[in-house]
Structures are given as structure tokens and as C-alpha cells.
Image (cartoon, grey):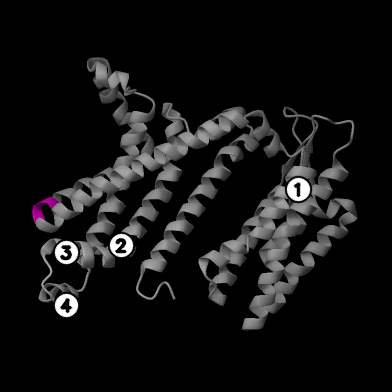
Amino acid sequence: MLAAVAAWLSLDAVSVAPNRIVPGTSHMALGVMAGWPAVLLALPMLAVVVLAWKPGRKELRLSLVAVVTLLALLPLWLSAATTVLVEPDMPQARVAIGRSLWLVLFLLLLATIELRTRLGLSRPLGWLLLVPMVSSWWLSLALWLEPLALLREYQARSDQFVSALLAHLILVGAAVGASLVLASLLALAMRRHAGIRRTGFAVLNFLQTIPSLALFGLLLAPLAWLGSRLDWLAAFGVSGIGWAPAFLALLGYSLLPMVRNIHVALEEVEPAVIESARGMGMSRRQVFLQVRLPLALPVVLEGIRITTVQAIGLTAVAALIGAGGLGTFIFQGLGQAAMDMVLLGALPIIVLALVADALFGSLSERLRPGGAA
């Protein structure tokens, strides 16, 4: 919170440019509206610092209320700053979020996670704490933040954004789904044969050490050759660029965490539990499906969680080889030095990763013994 106060009062909070081409003019929070709204927002941050000095349960609750309130007030402050700084005769003006606002938002979200953990609140309740912030941003974007540069980048590319998001999700879902099937077969084979286990983990570890761009590049030539030689592969869209090398690379990166978690989950089931099931007259199939697999499922879900979050991030790089996805905006923005276009691709990727992590994490916790309680 001290870092948030320092960033809020010392760094630029917002910048205003007359159009997309001309660089914007930066403004500190203390320089907007005579600085008094910035001071008012800094006071709850200082209050949290005081409450955190000797934190009891009451102090932690008050701190959480203050942090959630601040998260909801930030977009309202940005809306007021936009109204003051953007002149009515500047229809092409663009307002960009500055360093202090990004840092404060990041630090407040970290504080929310820390306070939720200390208070022992459940994951679903933790997500509900973000409802005031999300509602405030939605209201601000709908009513007052029309000049926001990020919003204007989205409005100019809304159809392309939806297509890129769908392509990103399809590529991630296909890679994770295929890796789950292959990893399950590999893990089962590894449990039966020590040689397959040693060789399999050696190959998967090797694949994990290859940089993503290098792996994409290594796949271009063989897939281009196959696409030119086999008409049915070419008709299916397999070529040196596009979805095929991206899918294979993501599949290769996804196998190691998936195989490791499935193998460990199946191996770490207590032998006494298995012996008890066999003593009850269960067959090998029944023991696996009704005892071993349900007990291993939470750890398997952790593997799916890790793989999904990793795939969501790596799919952004696949845009470099024509696979589409949200990474397209990132690299286009970098090429045009348009940071708001970069954010248009990066922010949804972050949100997707956080949502996937939370969903699979919550499901894994509920499936653990005593998790439902």
C-alpha cells in the first residue's frame, strides 16, 4: 500500500493526445482537478497501512473494504479526469491510462488476494469482491470513457477482436484436449513399463527446453513438405504456417505437465486403499475407475490447470506464424508503436489465464477430501 501511495502521487496517471498519431501529454493525479480527488483516494491507502500495522481480524476486514472501495473508485476518477482534460472540440482525442493508475490497480488487486487469503475467504467469494470494480468499469466505459484509447482500439477492431478471441480459445482448447488424451495414454503406459517412463520423461523434458519460437520454426519445414506432398493434409489446412505448427507446438509443451501430474496422481494413491478395494472383491477395472481415478482427480485437474494457463500464454506467440489469436494485436501494436493495441491483445490473455486458473483451482479444491466443506 505504501508503494501504491508513492506511485499514485509521483507518477503520471493519465495522458491525453489530440489523435492517434500525436504523442500524448502526461498528467499526474495531483495535477488533475486541483489534486483534491487524488488526495482523497490516497487517504484510504494510508488507512490500510495503519490498519496493517497490527492486523487483527477486524482490521483485515476494514482493510478489505477499503481496498475493494478503492478499486471501484479508480475508474470513476479516470472518468472525471477525462471529462476535465478532454476539450469538447477534440472529437479525436484519446485518453491513455498512465503508469501510476496501472501500478495502483495491480497493487490493489494483490492486496485483495492477500486479504482474502488471510481472512480465509473462499475462491468464489474472492471473485465476488471484484464485482464492484467490474461494475464501475462497465458504467464508466458506457457513459464517460468514450475517449479512452483502449476502448477506441477495440471499437475500430471489434469484429476482428471477436474472431481473434474465438481462434485463441479454439487453439487452446484443441491443444489442451489432445494433450489430456495423449497424456492419459502415456501415463498409463508409464505405470506398466519403466522403460517407457524413463524414455517418455526424457523426451518431454527435452521438448520443454526448446524455446517456443524455435519450436515453431522447426515445425515449418516438415509441415510445409507434408502439405505439398499429401493433398488430403493440404485440404485440411496443414502447411508451414497457420494452425498446424501452432497446434503441434502447443501440444508438445502441454504434454510434460499433463503427463507428470497424471502419473504422480495415479501413483500416489495409498496402497492400503487399493488393497481394501481389492479385499471387497473389486476387479482391476473397478478399482481403477471407482477408487484410484476419483482419488487422483484433484491432482489431474491441477495438471489441466497448469497446462491451460501455459497454453493461453503461448498461443499469443503463435500469431507470428499466422495462427491468429489475440497475439495478432500484440505484434501489430508493437510494429506500430501503439501500446493500446498491445493492451487490446494482452489484457484478454491475462483475464483468460486468471479465469482458467480460478475455475480449475476451485474445482480441484472441491474434489479434494473435505474440500466441499
Residue type indicated by callout 4: Ala
Circles 3 and 2 in contact, beta carbons < 8 Å: no
* Numbered circle sitting on residue 140: 1
Callout 1 secondary element: helix
Which mark identifies residue 70? none
Which mark is in front, 3 or 1? 3
Locate residue 365: give its quadrant. bottom left
Distance from Cα at disc 4 to Cα at disc 1 = 59 Å
Q: Residue at x 79, y 44 (%)?
A: 143
Spot occupied by residue 266 in the image (x, y as percentages of width and height): 22, 63
Residue 100 seen in render:
no
**Along the line of sight, the residue nearer the viewer: 275 or 175:** 275
First in sequence: mark 4 vs mark 1? 1
Q: Earlier in the sequence, mark 3 or mark 1?
A: 1
Q: Crowding at label 3, few (<14), some or many (≥20) Cα neighbours within 10 Å?
A: some
Residue under numbered circle 4: 272
On-image quarter of the N terminus: bottom right
Q: Mark 2 — residue?
A: 297
Residue 167 in view here: yes
Would you place residue 4 above or below residue 142 in this image? below
Categorize mark 4 by other alpha carbons within 10 Å: few (<14), some (14-19), many (20+): few
* Marks 2,4: beta carbons within 8 A: no
Considering only order in the chain, which callout, 4 or 2, is on the residue closer to the N terminus? 4
Taking the image as shown, residue 260 lies to the left or right of residue 151, namely left
The nearer-to-camera label among 3 and 2 is 3
Q: Residue flagged by tag 1: what amino acid is it?
A: Ser
Q: Which residue is mark 3?
A: 286
